[in-house]
Image (cartoon, helix red, strand yellow):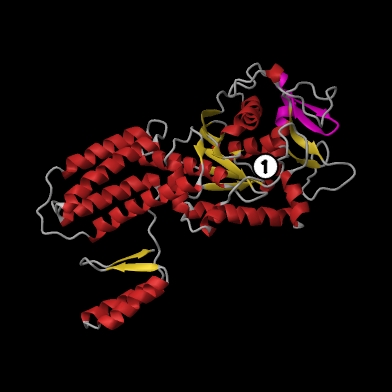
Amino acid sequence: MRFGHTVYNFAHIGNLRTYIFEDILRRTLEFNGYNVKHVMNITDVGHLTSDADEGEDKMELSIKKEKKSAYEIAEKYSKAFFNDLKDLNIQSPTTICKATDHIKEMIDLVKALEKKGFTYQTSDGIYFDTSNLKDYGKLARLQIDQLKEGFRIEKKEKRNKSDFALWKFSPKDKKREMEWPSPWKVGFPGWHIECSAMSIKYLGEQFDIHCGGIDHIPVHHTNEIAQSESFTGKKPWVKYWLHGEFLIVDEGKMSKSENNFLTLQSLKNKGYDPLVYRFFCLETQYRKQLKFSFESLDNTKNSLERLKEFVRKIKSYQSDSLGYKDLDKLISICEKGFKEEINNDLEIPGALAYLFDFIKQINILLSEEKLSNQDAQLILEFIEKIDSILGILKEEEIPNKITKLAAERVIARENKDWKKSDELRDKIKQLGYQVDDSKKKIIIKKI
């Protein structure tokens, strides 16, 4: 499976919604016993500001704006992006590949397409001739006669409305920071060619799943298919295409170009755990638009806290009960329904309904003290199994300073030094944590 990211700015939470859905996909495949080779490409060159092969490279614009080198820009935003993925508990790809490390592969791919008769040269680059393909645009069901002309290439040079750049020539009047020699002229790769070149290198001439945002269907993914299948001669190049819908705000689609976007850091600055946002995204199926509001995020925050509280309750549960004889049946019903829903095009909201119904029934059994300690352990193991897909119950890391204070408090209570015990409790609370020692087990949690 493959997907990628362009590193000219911070990822916004709409971008990150797509990576959350893709992480759920990978976790679901692994849950079903598949071995997943997950490739992510990093676009650090070649992504123009317009899909019509016009405008400037987005990396070049960031260079001007931030007065840093292209490689510094790429390093800055790549680091921020991968920190976001870590905060959201998104698994690391098995392979990460940068466009600037694969210029040779891109040139070789363009040369191969040229040899097969799929290209032509204009004054500003090497273009792919889509008229050679009878099924061009099949993914998006494009009506070619309705496509708009690109403005950078005059109509007399561009043979067809849908033709696209494989290799762009550097402007004659200035030197780009990112440019390379080629068999044609000094220049840089088109956005589409780099994705095909890296996919073919790491996943072969055919692979199973390609993911991305829904906005990539009519141009980027359509052009990837055209050039890749023309090169390999194999159809289909990709067996399954999965696309995530937009995250929208009151102003419409969240977009960097419209300057109406929120970053994960901005949510963290407001006190939200990144896993609250992950859970928020899971409450709507990935192929449906999701409207963002802080009110909705607060509701999700409360739901996640209740789920965490349930887990803490199970972990600290102690009872002399002999156990509940129908527990295996309850677990089996939940697991069967949960699995059916996630395997139905990642229908996570439906899967969550089974989980919440299970928790409701377990809470009743807890209140009636019908569960044994062994039952509690089985429930905990089942919740952890479910969370191997959801990824929202990441264990909170308690700082050493807090655990030491909690240990001191245990000693104070054993010595019946209630004054010191209360002082330590207040000190722990001032540091943002709470100690629950009402049960036999001591539970520390972040406030």
In the rendered image, residue 119 lying in the magenta stretch gets the answer yes
The image quarter in which residue 137 lies: top right
Local crowd at mark 1 within 10 Å, few (<14), some, or many (≥20)? few
Q: Quadrant of residue 161?
A: top right
Q: Amino acid at mark 1?
A: Glu
Q: Nearer the viewer, residue 236 or 20?
A: 20
Q: Is residue 239 above or below residue 270?
A: above
Q: Residue furthest right?
A: 173
Looking at the image, residue 181 lies above or below residue 158:
below
Between 248 and 315, the residue placed more toward the observer is 248
* Mark 1 residue element: loop
Q: Which residues are magenta?
A: 112-131
Residue assigned mark 1: 258
Tell me what residue is drawn at x 17 percent, y 49 percent: 365
Instruction: Tell me where residue 185 appears, x and y as whole percent.
Output: 83, 38
Q: Position of residue 162 (x, y in %)?
A: 72, 24
Relative to 237, is 21 on the left or the right?
A: left
Residue at image location 29% in from the left, 35% down from the top: 337
Q: Is residue 132 visible?
A: no
Q: For the C terminus, give its image quadrant.
A: bottom left
Looking at the picture, how far across and down is residue 324, in whole percent?
Answer: 13, 47
Q: Residue at x 21, y 44 (%)?
A: 361
Measured as percent of width and height from the top left, residue 263 is found at 58, 51
In the shown orientation, is residue 351 left or right of residue 158?
A: left
Q: Is residue 107 visible?
A: yes
